[in-house]
Amino acid sequence: MLPVSLRRSSLSRVIKKSAGWIAAVLALAGTAVFLLGQSPAAPLRFVILGDRMGEVVAGKYEAVWKAIAAEKPAFVVGVGDSIQGGSDATAETEWLDLGRILEPFRKIPYFPSAGNHDIWNEASATLYVKHAGRPLHYSFDQGPVHFTMLDNSLGDALAPGELAFLEEDLKAHQKQPVKFIVSHRPSWILNVVVKNPDFPLAQLAAKYGVEYVVAGHVHEMMHLSLEGVEYISAPSAGGHLRASGKYEDGWFFGYIVATVNGTDVQFSVHELGASHGEGRVTPLSDWGVVGLLKK
């Protein structure tokens, strides 16, 4: 039998060695519990903003931005027509006036596209880049989402250069799981209405997995689908209402909130409340090409 002093020494070494293993096991267990208990990434929420012009209705655009700020979005994507434009003599002043309207909301990142009221010649394009703070076409990522912002301010169709930029951009960002194409004019609308997928934008969307295409220009809330792609026309954010002017026909002042969970995107369509509207909120699925599906 070992002497008591040696037995105690051996036991001490075993305890110390065991303590090291126990600490390691506990650390690993704690890490596992932490990882298992982690909450999933918070949803990404952003807003799609419609036209301010043409023929602005006083007070609507400011009210839309106040409502947007209350939503606390991560950022805002705009479809253009920020100024009335058309005159080189007044364009700079109009941009400065817009800047004063947006000043209280500068903390919200804003990504506009160029509208036909924003750009009508080379000089106005230069002013647009200066005051909007964005190129005529560009792209950006937010979380899992990639946005390609196109310029069709000078014509209804997407010019060959824009389509080339679109394909190059989508090819370079194929790994992004969610993709949006945004432009001012809905150059796609006639083809989508007649269910014709054989046009360049739709072909590129199919090739690179784009699921959402957004535009403005007509000031009317519209929603169409074609071969797995959702096409969205944003409601007015201040530009005058046309045709019947009725909410159920897509004519109202408001905005769209998009919520991204992983690769799932849900849209809610918001009408202004108070003195500007009735504050109605509907899912995108309630809307079609001529307004609400159930009127």
Image: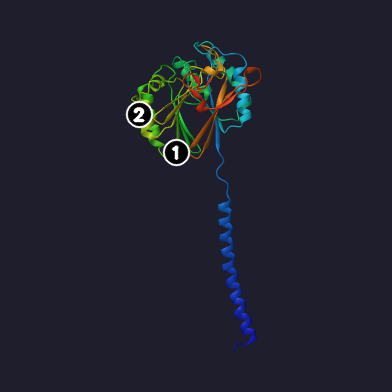
The three-letter code of the residue at mark 2 reads: Gln
* In contact (CB < 8 Å): disc 1 and disc 2: no
Q: Which residue is mark 1?
A: 177
Residue 213's x, y, as percent? 44, 27
The three-letter code of the residue at mark 1 reads: Pro
For the view shown, which residue lies furthest in the right direction? 274
Foreground: 153 or 57? 57
Q: Earlier in the sequence, mark 1 or mark 2?
A: 1
Q: For the residues marked 1 and 2, what is the alpha-carbon distance in whole angstroms?
A: 18 Å
Question: Which residue: 52% across, 36% down?
Answer: 260
Res. 194 in view: yes
Task: Using a 10 Å C-alpha cutoff, classify the residue at mark 2 as few (fewer than 14 neighbours), some (14 to 19) or many (20 or more).
Answer: few
Res. 100 in view: no
Q: Which residue is mark 2?
A: 203
Q: Is residue 242 above or below residue 234?
A: above
What colouring style does the render use?
rainbow
